[in-house]
Structure formats: C-alpha cells, structure tokens
Amino acid sequence: MRLIIIFFALIGVLVACNTDKNDEPQEKVEKSVEKKPEVLSKEALNSQILLLNDSLKNLSISRFMMDAKSDQSQKIVLDTKISVLRQELINQNLAYFYNYSNDSLAPYCLINIYGIYDNIKAYDLSLNYLDTLQHYYPEFELPNLILDLRAVTLDYVIKPRDISKIKKAYEELLKSPDTNDEDAKRYKNRLLNIDKGFNDLIN
C-alpha cells in the first residue's frame, strides 16, 4: 500500500482561460488569451489549500467506507467529486509554484503533486514532478521516504526499466545522511543485481 503524501498548506489558484471553440470572433479569442488573471496572496492560497485538503480527505474516507452494497450512483457521484477536488488541489500547487517559486514552501508544492499522482498510481507523472523539483531546487533535500519510494517505483513498477535511473536513485539513497546501516546494506545489495528485474529475483 502506497502512502498518501500531502504536506503543509501552500498553494494557489490555477488560472485556466477557457475560450469558446469556433463560434467566437478571432479578435475576442486573442483578447481572452492575453488577459492576465489575478494572483491571490500567499495567505489566500494557503487557506484554499487547507480547505481542499480537508474536503478531499473527508470525501476519500467516505468513499473508502463504502462497500459492495452501497448505491452505485452514489459511488459515481463521490468518485467524480474526488476527481474534481484532486485536480483542483494539483492546480493550486502548480499556481503557488509558478507565482511564488522563490518562496521556501514552493518545493513542497511539487512534493504535494508527486504524492497525489503517486497515490492514484500515475507513476510517470509523479516521478516527473520529483525531477522538476530537483531541477529547480537542487539544494532541496528530499526525505528518505520519498527517495525510497522513487527507487522502488523505478525499479519494480515503471516499464521498461531504465537501469541508469534506477542506479542513480539507489546511489542517492546511499549518499543520504538519513540512511541507516540496514537500509544501506539493502541498497548496496540491490545495486549488485541491478540488471535483474522482480521476476528474475524471485525465480
């Protein structure tokens, strides 16, 4: 069971400029694209993310408590609400990252998005946001929990396996000051058999 990683409140308002498809004059469409949306303050964004987190958590618990006898239409409605809230939470994190990228909380926005995608098993997307984080914030130290999840995901989930990325992920864990001796031994043993996938190891 993978962990849901939703960190402290941060984040902002996603701006999406939706224009009608071919039934508007071209000039009007161009004006709508050029119009810049209002950016909320950090405090306002913080309040929004807290509200979204609480709402998503409560709905997710309600959905988890449903059993096979629950009304199917209610399940569909709840799943839809969860999906909408999840996307809005992603949007809020992105908005904070885009608008306040120099703020100390901005890296956590990307971690939030990583956790959301990881939780719904969209692993390629989740790993992309970790890569983005390390690109923009190379000095930011990721927790070992996330580093370990990334290594395992690359090693056993993503297909085809990218040996160079898997090796780099385990080597990063070995360099971490938070890696204990037992885990270090496990990572070293895995590196010795890095060419073998899960099926090869169990056979």
Image: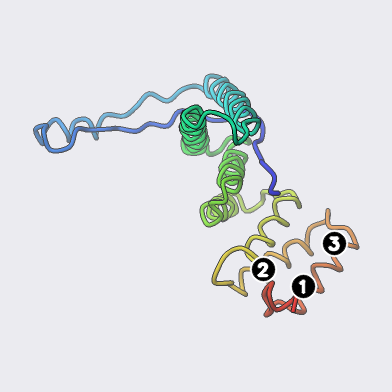
Question: Residue at label 1?
Answer: 190
* Mark 2: secondary structure: helix
Q: Position of residue 104 (x, y in %)?
A: 63, 36
Q: Along the horizontal axis of the image, is 193 left or right of 55?
A: right
Identify the mark nearer the N-term, 1 or 2.
2
Residue type at tag 2: Lys
Marker disc for residue 131: none
Quadrant, the C terminus: bottom right
The residue most toward the right is 181
Residue placed farthest to the front in the image? 69
Q: Give the residue at mark 2.
A: 168
Label 3, secondary structure: give it.
Answer: helix
Q: State whether residue 12 appears in this view.
A: no
Find residue 9 and report its horizontal and vertical position in percent: 62, 28
- The residue beneath circle 3 is 183
Under mark 3, the amino acid is Asp
Q: Earlier in the sequence, mark 2 or mark 3?
A: 2
Residue 82 at x, y percent in the picture: 52, 32
Badge 3 local density, few (<14 within 10 Å), some, or many (20+)? some
Left or right position of 34 against 114: left
Total labels: the figure holds 3
**Category of crowding for the residue at label 1, using alpha-carbon neighbours closer than 10 angstroms: few (below 14), some (14–19), many (at least 20):** some
